[in-house]
Each structure stands twice: as C-alpha cells, then as structure tokens.
Amino acid sequence: MPKFITIGYGDQAGYDRTPQDVRDAAHAQDTRLVSKGALVGIACAPVQVRNPDATGVETRDGPFMSADLPIAGFAVIEAASLEEAIEKVSQVPCAVAHGVVEVWPLK
C-alpha cells in the first residue's frame, strides 16, 4: 500500500482556541492511525546536519526552513490513494486546531 509522510504545523494559540470536544476527537483520530500502523510523533527541537563534500559533519541548532506556523509533528501513514490519505489526516489535531497538514506521497 502507498505510504505518505505528513507534516503538521500548528501553534499553542490555535490549539487552545479549538473546542475541547474537537481536540479530543482529533487525538482519537491520531490514536486510530497509530493502531493501524502509522508512525506518529510530536516534533521537538531540530538540529541541522551538513557534511559538505564529505569533509566533516557540521551541526547547528534550529530549523533550516521557516513557516508561518511551527512544525508540530510528523506521521508516516499508509493509504490506498492521496485522497484517502487526505481524508485520514483531515481530522487530526493540526488540521482542526487552526493549523495545517501537508501530505507528501512517497515513491
């Protein structure tokens, strides 16, 4: 079955203004995805890694990319189609709590 990487963006303010019952249902959707084999995680502080021309590893704290909202989490899910993947993530916390979820098909 095809796999998709999802990236959830959201912030605490958007989460906090979302009704509790909507948040609870969104967390239940995350639990369903995990029970069906999805790898779901909350994003922590990133580290950039570079190794130009394989001459030595360089690291730097912090994200490389920036967005209007911080990255809140990631998931790897399976779905029969992009449409099914979209349906699966349309009810997760970032999607319903004033954030956004990107869906990236994997080859």
Image: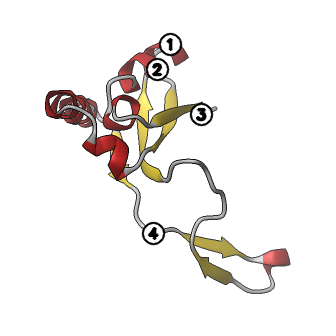
Alpha carbon separation for disc pair 3 and 1: 14 Å
Q: Nearer the viewer, residue 50 or 54?
A: 50
Q: Secondary structure at mark 3?
A: loop
Which residue was labeled with disc 3? 106
Residue type beneath disc 2: Ile
Q: Are marks 3 and 1 in contact (CB under 8 Å)?
A: no
- Residues at circles 2 and 4 in contact by the CB criterion of under 8 Å: no
**What's the residue at 51%, 48% (across, down)?**
69
Tell me if label 2 and label 1 are in contact, CB under 8 Å. yes
Mark 4 crowd level (few <14, some 14–19, many ≥20, 10 Å Cα): few
* CA distance separating discs 2 and 1: 5 Å
Q: Where 84 falls versus 51 (above or below)? A: above
Report helix, strand or loop for mark 4: loop
Where in the figure is residue 41, as x and y percent of width and height?
34, 51
Q: Secondary structure at mark 1?
A: helix
Which image quadrant for residue 55? Answer: bottom right
**Three-letter amino acid code of the residue under disc 1:** Glu
> Which class describes the residues within 10 Å of circle 2: few (<14), some (14-19), or many (20+)?
some
Name the residue carrying label 2.
86
Mark 2 to mark 3 CA distance (whole Å): 14 Å
Distance, label 3 to label 4, CA atoms, is 25 Å
The relative height of residue 55 versus residue 18 in the rendered view (above or below) is: below
